[in-house]
Image (tube, rainbow, N blue to C red):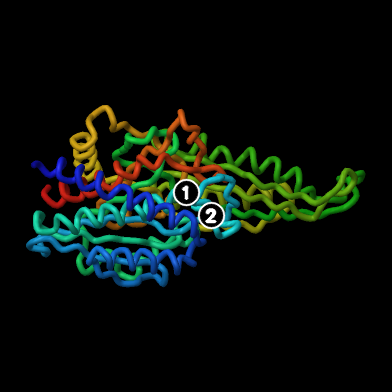
């Protein structure tokens, strides 16, 4: 029997357990960096498969599956453990028992899938050469991102993986399908906090005031020039301001206005340049209109770069495993993901797992109270991840 068929057989046999594991994690969600019970549950399951693990980043885990000749090559597979502060609205047996916390981003699926893939790889360890590194990280949803902490604590050393592979649920894609994109895929995301300072007073005597509301109106329009005139059309860039707070009244000009927004792009050099341009334009525009400002730009996750060679091979493996019809090209996605930190360090591939089932009404987006998945996707995900890992060890 060839490797793909062997893995398909194991995936079919292990999928029911993966469903149970996913449901357990789903019913017992924990917020970012508080994944103590989830981590000990994962540890216990790995142990039951004969895989020893080590704690990392407080609530994360790392484990190795050694094949024959383990020094030959190492490939890392990554899952994230954390849930979101959302009240679950699904009426299912495995509904969150932790009121106000919900696995609404599918990290329960990623963790259960990596455990399922690990079970398959452990079963086949005499049949491959090299080492599989399993990375279960905390805190994907919360800055500074569990990935950055795992990297600082050495997850990419001893042994250093030649590549890292992660997957994420994708409710826009039907279960049974997966999606890939080579090169830039997801955006960096930085937070912008501006306080525009003027001089408040009676709205009937504008000549006595410095109006921070008018300055802010100009500023918001002017800052879009960073996107339309300074960003290269070849580099996706988004600047959005979602919060604007001027606590005056119909007849009161306030002293200051607070503005908050997000800056997203897909190039680290341009990202730094853009921050400088945003600061300079904000300061000089406020000053030119008689006001002043405080501006703070907080760096979020970097942009996510899928290594073209690794992604090409992973995609080819997926076509082999699932058939060409079940592998699609992904569009750019201006959302951010802390897997991007790994992609700045080693060749990385982040692909999407289809979880949608239109006929069963499973269509809600991630981060919504009704997000759920078609669990048939789990058989696909555990087998495919194991297969991609083995193809990569052989590459
Ligand atoms: Zn999320
Ligand atoms: Zn997520």
- Picture residue at 57% right of the left edge, 56% below the top: 85
Q: Quadrant of the N terminus?
A: top left
- Label 1 crowd (10 A; few <14 / some 14-19 / many >=20): many
Residue position for label 1? 105
Foreground: 292 or 35?
35
Secondary-structure class at tag 1: loop
Residue 69 horizontal/vertical position (percent): 7, 63
Is residue 340 something one can see in this rendering? Answer: no
Secondary-structure class at tag 2: loop
Residue 125 horizontal/vertical position (percent): 14, 58
Q: Is residue 193 left or right of residue 120?
A: right
Is residue 260 something one can see in this rendering? Answer: yes
Disc ID at residue 229: none
- Picture residue at 27% right of the left edge, 27% below the top: 325
Q: Is mark 2 within 8 Å of ligand 1?
A: no
- Picture residue at 11% right of the left edge, 49% below the top: 394
Circle 2 or circle 1, nearest the eye: 2
Residue 322 horizontal/vertical position (percent): 24, 35
Foreground: 79 or 216?
79
Residue position for label 2? 96
- Label 2 crowd (10 A; few <14 / some 14-19 / many >=20): many
CB-based contact (under 8 Å), mark 2 and mark 1 = no
Q: Is residue 368 left or right of residue 1?
A: right
Foreground: 332 or 322?
322
Q: Is mark 1 within 8 Å of ligand 1?
A: yes
Above or below, 60 against 288 in this view is below
Residue 57 horizontal/vertical position (percent): 39, 70
Number of disc labels: 2
The numbered mark, 2 or 1, whose residue comes first in the sequence reads 2
Q: Is residue 203 left or right of residue 280?
A: right
The Cα–Cα distance between marks 2 and 1, rounded to whole angstroms, is 13 Å
Indicate the quadrant where residue 134 lies. bottom left
């Amino acid at each position: 029997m060839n490797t793909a068929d062997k893995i398909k057989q194991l995936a079919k046999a292990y999928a029911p357990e993966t469903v149970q594991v996913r449901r357990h994690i789903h019913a017992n969600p924990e917020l970012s960096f508080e994944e103590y019970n989830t981590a000990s549950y994962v540890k216990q399951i790995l142990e039951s498969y004969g895989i020893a693990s080590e704690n990392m980043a407080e609530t994360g885990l790392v484990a190795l599956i050694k094949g024959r000749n383990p020094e030959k090559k190492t490939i890392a597979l990554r899952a994230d453990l954390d849930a979101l502060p959302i009240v679950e609205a699904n009426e299912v047996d495995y509904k969150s028992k932790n009121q106000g916390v919900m696995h609404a981003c599918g990290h329960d699926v990623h963790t259960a899938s990596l455990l399922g893939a690990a079970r398959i790889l452990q079963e086949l360890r005499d049949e491959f050469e090299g080492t599989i590194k399993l990375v279960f990280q905390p805190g994907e949803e919360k800055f500074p991102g569990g990935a950055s902490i795992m990297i600082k604590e050495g997850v990419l050393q001893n042994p250093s993986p030649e590549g890292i592979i992660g997957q994420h649920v994708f409710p826009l894609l039907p279960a049974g399908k997966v999606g890939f994109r080579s090169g830039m895929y997801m955006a960096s995301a930085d937070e912008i906090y501006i306080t525009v300072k003027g001089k408040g007073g009676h709205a009937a005597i504008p000549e006595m005031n410095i109006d921070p509301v008018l300055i802010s109106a100009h500023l918001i329009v002017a800052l879009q020039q960073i996107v339309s005139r300074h960003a290269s059309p070849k580099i996706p860039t988004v600047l959005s301001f979602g919060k604007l707070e001027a606590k005056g009244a119909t007849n009161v000009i306030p002293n200051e206005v607070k503005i908050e927004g997000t800056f997203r792009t897909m190039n680290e050099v341009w990202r730094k340049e853009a921050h400088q341009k945003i600061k300079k334009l904000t300061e000089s525009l406020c000053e030119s209109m008689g006001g002043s400002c405080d501006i703070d730009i907080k760096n979020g996750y970097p942009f996510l770069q899928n290594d073209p060679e690794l992604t090409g091979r992973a995609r080819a493996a997926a076509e082999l495993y699932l058939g060409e019809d079940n592998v699609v090209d992904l569009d750019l996605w201006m959302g951010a993901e802390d897997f991007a930190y790994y992609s700045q360090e080693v060749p990385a591939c982040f692909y999407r797992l289809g979880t949608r089932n239109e006929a069963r009404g499973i269509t809600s987006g991630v981060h919504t109270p009704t997000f759920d998945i078609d669990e048939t996707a789990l058989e696909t995900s555990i087998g495919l991840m194991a297969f991609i890992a083995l193809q990569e060890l052989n590459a």
